[in-house]
């Protein structure tokens, strides 16, 4: 990849940069902008892992802390030209068991960052989710656009919707230079094994069957994490201040199709388990604004099989990264089912 100067300054603060999507973003940004200094702010909860940043050079600094910590956030924001906000509580099942951390992190944490941006004048990008739009019926030809009304259906998606509204309010009320992206379901390396795709992969790698919620007809619009992060960089580089951009790769697949492809690639089997409460039926993103305005196209695109093969290979060759957490995750699922 050709080295080029960063169009958004010399120093970037990445919240949640030791998590799944955030750490992949840090890796991509350092490849594209080798001179860029990146400060990662991460609480290193169960979803964050310092090992996700292993092998990166001295231009990447990890600061362990929470985005709700006003003093620390202010100090770090004063050093940064741009802030990319990935940090969030993000697991639907966990939000159903205990919504309080989602309210505190996703709402209070975003507010804390926005106040720092208002003070220091940083370029700010807020990473959100397609789940704020609720869901679509399985036979609805429509896709979510940037104008789709918000209809969140879980504590997780409700708090992400609230954080999106906070960003828009700070743009309008205080004139901060911010953009928002709403992305479809990500998959790829470094994703926590509680999530759907890595859970099935690691089940099969440990001799367990893959497990499918309900009838498996629920549809998600899948995108490889590298494509998502390439889109975030495109928005940082060329996006219009105050705008929201949907990110998607036209990768709609039912959970049943996904699990059957994983089993085909790995030579395994799956079984059905009880569906989870409030399980949204279908997500689908219209990313035509992103493609038309910014000229972005995904690398994997609709070649979901190739992206999934790459992901399976990563989990096969990085067993030490996930193996120690596997039994605890499965115990948590067993306790939830009782």
Image (spheres, rainbow, N blue to C red):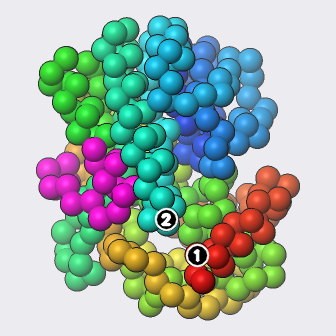
Label 2 vs 1, first from the N-terminus: 2
Where in the figure is residue 246, as x and y percent of width and height? 29, 48
Quadrant of the rendered structure where residue 215 is? bottom left
Q: Does 306 lie within the magenta span?
A: no
Q: Quadrant of the N terminus?
A: top right
Which residue is depicted at the point 18% across and 69% down? 142
Where in the figure is residue 89, as x and y percent of width and height? 49, 48
**Residue indicated by mark 2:** 97
In the image, is residue 260 above or below residue 30?
below
Number of other residues with Cα within 10 Å of mark 1, as a class: few under 14, some 14 to 19, many 20 or more: few
Where in the figure is residue 172, as x and y percent of width and height? 15, 24
User: Does residue 151 appear left or right of residue 314 in this picture?
Assistant: left
Residue furthest right as drawn: 320
User: Does residue 10 appear left or right of residue 128 in this picture?
Assistant: right
Which residue is depicted at the point 39% across and 25% down? 112
User: What element does badge 1 sit on?
Assistant: helix
Number of other residues with Cα within 10 Å of mark 2, as a class: few under 14, some 14 to 19, many 20 or more: few
Tag 2 and tag 1, C-beta contact below 8 Å: yes
User: Does residue 168 appear left or right of residue 189 in this picture?
Assistant: left
Q: Quadrant of the C terminus?
A: bottom right
**Residue indicated by mark 1:** 336
In the image, is residue 261 above or below residue 285?
below
Q: Which residues are magenta?
A: 145-162
Q: Does 156 lie within the magenta span?
A: yes
User: What element does badge 2 sit on?
Assistant: helix
């Amino acid at each position: 990849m050709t080295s080029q100067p960063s169009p958004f300054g010399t120093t970037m603060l990445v919240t949640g940069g030791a998590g799944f999507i955030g750490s992949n973003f840090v890796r991509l940004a350092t490849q594209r902008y080798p001179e860029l200094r990146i400060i990662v702010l991460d609480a290193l909860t169960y979803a964050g892992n310092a090992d996700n940043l292993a092998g990166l050079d001295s231009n990447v600094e990890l600061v362990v802390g929470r985005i709700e910590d006003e003093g620390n956030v202010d100090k770090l924001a004063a050093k940064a030209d741009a802030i990319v906000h990935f940090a969030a509580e993000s697991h639907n099942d966990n939000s159903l068991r205990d919504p309080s951390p989602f309210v505190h992190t996703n709402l209070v944490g975003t507010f804390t960052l926005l106040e720092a941006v208002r003070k220091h004048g940083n370029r700010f990008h807020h990473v959100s989710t397609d789940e704020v739009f609720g869901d679509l019926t399985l036979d609805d030809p429509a896709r979510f656009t940037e104008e789709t009304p918000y209809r969140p259906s879980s504590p997780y998606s409700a708090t992400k919707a609230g954080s999106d509204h906070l960003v828009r309010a700070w743009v309008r009320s205080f004139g901060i230079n911010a953009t928002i992206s709403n992305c479809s379901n990500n998959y790829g390396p470094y994703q926590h094994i509680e999530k759907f795709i890595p859970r099935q992969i690691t089940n099969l790698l440990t001799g367990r069957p893959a497990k499918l919620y309900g009838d498996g007809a629920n549809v998600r619009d899948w995108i490889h994490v590298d494509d998502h992060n390439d889109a975030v960089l495109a928005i940082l580089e060329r996006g219009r201040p105050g705008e929201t951009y949907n990110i998607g790769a036209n990768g709609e697949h039912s959970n049943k199709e996904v699990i059957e492809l994983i089993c085909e690639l790995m030579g395994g089997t799956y079984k059905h388990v009880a569906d989870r409460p409030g399980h949204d039926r279908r997500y689908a993103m219209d990313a035509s604004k992103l493609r038309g305005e910014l000229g972005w196209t995904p690398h994997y695109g609709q070649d979901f099989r190739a992206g999934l093969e790459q992901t399976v290979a990563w989990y096969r060759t990085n067993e030490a990264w996930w193996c120690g957490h596997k039994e605890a995750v499965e115990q948590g699922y067993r306790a939830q089912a009782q």
